[in-house]
Image (cartoon, rainbow, N blue to C red):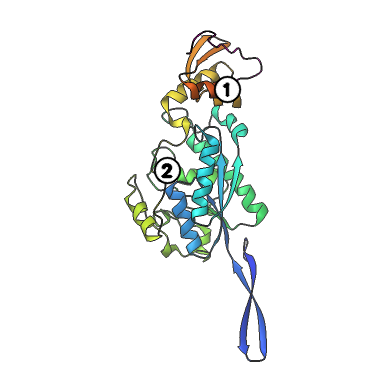
Amino acid sequence: MIHGARPKQARLRTCPNVLLSVIIFMTKAIVMFSGGLDSVLTAKVLMNEGIDVLGLTFITEFSAIDVPKFTEKIKKRAEAISLKLRIIDISQEFLGLLKDPFYGFGANINPCVDCKIYMLKRAKEIMEKEGYSFIATGEVVGERPMSQRRDTLYVIEKKAGLKGYLLRPLSAKLLNPTVPEETGLINREHLYAISGRSRKPQMELAEKFGISEYAQPAGGCLLTEPAFSSRLKDIIKHDMLNIDNIKLLKFGRHFRLDAKTRFVLGRDEKDNENVLSSAEKNDVILSPKDFNG
């Protein structure tokens, strides 16, 4: 039996009075699904090959300002292509990567390489436990300077323990053949050789697949944003790193009063509401008594 294949029953008529039962195996694969165009296309490429695909999304408090709203968008993008989706919140576990990432940070406080390795290790656990054949990502050679260089892609694959079992369908023809390609689970000729930062090839492929609505390129992870990263570095320096404080970093203006005290000022009604909802038990809340502000 092919590892990760799931049997289906089919009926084959050989003559008017004889009916045979035939086992058909369907390959199963996991796609790391962010909801962005690259991951949507990756899922569609595999689904069009008759592969049973599970979209796997890892969420952290750094995924967006409004994490619940962001999560709903991902769900809708998965539904739009009839993709099964599983969402896992790894916010707490992720904090450890911010202390001293082995491969360092990008331009801000984004441990992109360590982040990818960690998520892929988690995905590998699911792959092995539930009988999937391989994992695929929407990574494109040269699209991002830190984590999507050709040499870095191989490092990520090796360190995640997925050598030969991590497929990048959009750039597969520019990379070494994987086990799924070599064993015929997927046809390499049906994969692509996209590279660089231009989105034109992906947009053309989206049109080919009939995908008309997709997310436009944006900053994405908050750890890539200079202002947020500066605030985060401050709470790490003062040993105040926790989920509640991270939520608070997303709103208001921030001032450091002393080593143990950080002052957050709401700038408008929405900011004030978010600051209040993020307050911890021992926080001091100051509000104007006789005037608005």
Label 1 packing within 10 angstroms: few (<14), some (14-19), many (20+): some
Give percent across and percent down for residue 109.
Answer: 47, 28
Give percent across and percent down for residue 257.
Answer: 52, 8
Apparent side of residue 95 relative to residue 293 in the rendered image (left or right): right
The residue under the point 38% across, 41% down is 217
* Span of residues in magenta: 279-293
Position of the N terminus, as image quadrant, is: bottom right
Vertical relation: 34 (above or below) 63: below
The residue under the point 58% across, 11% down is 260
Mark 1 lies on a secondary structure that is: helix
User: Which residue is tagged 2?
Assistant: 148
* Front residue (pair 129, 223): 223
Question: Label 2, label 1: how many angstroms apart (C-alpha)?
Answer: 31 Å
Q: Amino acid at mark 1?
A: Asn
User: Which residue is tagged 1?
Assistant: 245
* Front residue (pair 77, 276): 276
Mark 2 lies on a secondary structure that is: loop
Residue 32 located within the stretch drawn in magenta: no
Give percent across and percent down for residue 170.
Answer: 42, 54
Q: Amino acid at mark 2?
A: Gln
- Tell me the number on the disc at residue 130: none
Task: Look at discs 2 and 1 and give the one toward the viewer.
Answer: 1
Do we see residue 1 in this rendering? Answer: no
* Front residue (pair 203, 264): 264
Label 2 packing within 10 angstroms: few (<14), some (14-19), many (20+): many
The residue under the point 62% across, 32% down is 92
- Looking at this rendering, what residue extends furthest in the front direction? 290
